[in-house]
């Protein structure tokens, strides 16, 4: 082409959670049965949607208006419902006009970063969820700036690291929080949130809090909404239906904007996000239509609690097995539905393997791992694990971190398959580290 078509920052777009699937599908075509632990889709892993939820959706389909466009910001009655819900929760006043719906939270994430000034950066946690880190890096044409989540301190953020980077990076305009966190399952304690708000206030930054897992918590920590402790700091809170109902195929997410008018620049930025959304006309109507009925149904809380109990049971079981493996450290998660073991880096090398009987499969794996970068040692493990044992996990190198490890889910509904998954890891990890 006579003109370069590739956007600056395109090389920053990476999503290992999906990329590893291509290799797994190739293995399946060669007869390897794969257990998919790569993506947080509860429905794909066997969770059953309650009949009353399906009935609510089916009833909405009898209304012809469900087939029409929704307003750009979203259905007014749904935004009013969410506004009243936040008031009832005591997490701050939210104007329905400060809620904007998107086609999934991924759409919202894209709009939030692409409408930033090119030189304005948002610092995020590391390990970093790649939808955020890649979108922010692509917007800036430079690697995502991160603050460290420390596995030695239950994955709590290193606030000294955060403050130091905010102080010495004048391009930083915002701080991202993912709470509960993906991939670590950590929940930000109230005091930590207060300190992050204080940093944002001191350096005149805005906050982004991805709270897609806000109702998926269990164990010792309880989720604390950021909106109730902002102290006037402008903020974007991200919510959605995909993990909570769960209904990932609905592609229904939204942002809640707080303290918009406390800063004219922030207000203009939010207007740009709305204007960009207006070019798409609207977001999907059906999930917006049924959202109030589902979330307000008296059966919903009991249903949600049953899911939390299931995740906690699996988290306990996985932690019990994995903590006994030498060379691996693991923190029991308190929220979301992931668990992230971390390797001792001193025990990894670029020559480690797992035995693979099929010569063609072994040759394919060897060819694939030969293309990996020198630092992608956990990625090497993940590909050998999939080829040798048929277990697909996501290497931590796909989460913008210097740590080595992998993410697995707590979603497997079949107890025999989940138990087998843990047994595979208990066998494969020592074998790999000693190879």
Image (cartoon, helix red, strand yellow):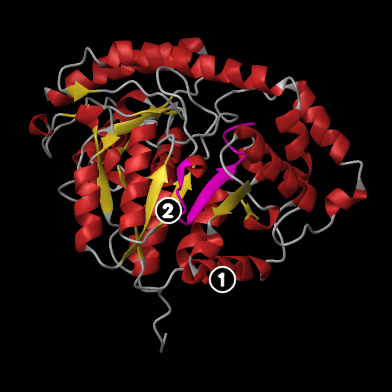
Between 275 and 198, the residue placed more toward the observer is 198
Q: Quadrant of the N terminus?
A: bottom left
Query: In the shown orientation, is residue 262 left or right of residue 80?
Result: left
- The numbered dot on residue 214 is none
Of all residues shown, which one is farthest toward the bottom? 2
Q: Residue under circle 2?
A: 207
Q: Position of residue 307 (x, y in %)?
A: 57, 19
Residue found at x 83% / y 28%: 55
Between 195 and 333, the residue placed more toward the observer is 195
User: Which numbered disc, 1 or 2, marks the residue that appears first in the sequence?
Assistant: 2
Magenta part of the chain: 229-245
Query: In the shown orientation, is residue 416 left or right of residue 275?
Result: left
Q: Is residue 341 visible?
A: yes
Query: In the shown orientation, is residue 318 left or right of residue 281?
Result: left
Q: Is residue 338 above or below residue 68?
A: above
- The numbered dot on residue 272 is 1
**Of the residues tagged 1 and 2, which is closer to the observer?**
2
């Amino acid at each position: 082409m006579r003109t370069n078509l590739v956007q600056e920052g395109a090389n920053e777009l990476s999503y290992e959670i999906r990329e590893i699937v291509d290799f797994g599908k190739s293995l399946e075509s060669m007869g390897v049965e794969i257990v998919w632990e790569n993506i947080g889709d509860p429905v794909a892993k066997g969770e059953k949607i309650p009949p009353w939820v399906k009935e609510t959706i089916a009833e909405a389909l009898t209304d012809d208006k469900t087939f029409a466009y929704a307003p750009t910001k979203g259905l007014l009655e749904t935004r009013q419902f969410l506004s009243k819900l936040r008031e009832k929760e005591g997490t701050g006043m939210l104007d329905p006009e400060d809620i904007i719906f998107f086609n999934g939270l991924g759409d919202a994430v894209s709009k939030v970063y692409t409408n930033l000034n090119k030189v304005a950066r948002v610092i995020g946690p590391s390990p970093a969820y790649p939808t955020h880190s890649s979108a922010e890096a692509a917007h800036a044409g430079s690697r995502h700036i991160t603050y460290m989540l420390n596995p030695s301190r239950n994955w709590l953020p290193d606030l000294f690291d955060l403050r130091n980077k905010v102080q010495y990076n004048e391009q930083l305009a915002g701080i991202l929080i993912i709470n509960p966190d993906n991939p670590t399952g950590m929940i930000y304690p109230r005091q930590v949130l207060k300190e992050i708000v204080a940093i944002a206030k001191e350096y005149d930054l805005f906050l982004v809090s991805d709270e897609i897992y806000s109702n998926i918590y269990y164990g010792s920590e309880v989720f604390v909404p950021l909106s109730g402790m902002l102290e006037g700091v402008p903020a974007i809170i991200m919510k959605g239906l995909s993990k909570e109902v769960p209904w990932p195929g609905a592609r229904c997410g939204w942002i809640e904007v707080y303290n918009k008018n406390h800063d004219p620049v922030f207000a203009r930025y939010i207007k740009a996000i709305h204007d960009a959304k207006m070019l798409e006309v609207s977001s999907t109507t059906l999930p917006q239509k049924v959202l109030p009925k589902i979330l307000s149904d008296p059966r919903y809380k009991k249903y949600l609690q049953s899911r939390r109990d299931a995740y906690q049971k699996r988290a306990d079981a996985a932690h019990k097995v994995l903590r006994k493996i030498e060379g691996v450290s693991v923190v029991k998660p308190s929220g979301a539905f992931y668990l992230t073991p971390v390797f001792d880096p001193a025990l990894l090398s670029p020559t480690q393997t797992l035995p693979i009987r099929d010569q063609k499969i072994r040759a394919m794996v060897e060819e694939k791992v030969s293309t990996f970068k020198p630092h992608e040692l956990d990625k090497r493990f993940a590909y050998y694990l999939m080829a040798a044992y048929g277990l697909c996990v996501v290497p931590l190198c796909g989460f913008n971190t210097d740590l080595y490890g992998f993410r697995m889910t707590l979603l497997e509904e079949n107890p025999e398959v989940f138990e087998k998954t843990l047994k595979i890891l208990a066998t494969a990890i020592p074998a790999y580290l000693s190879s």
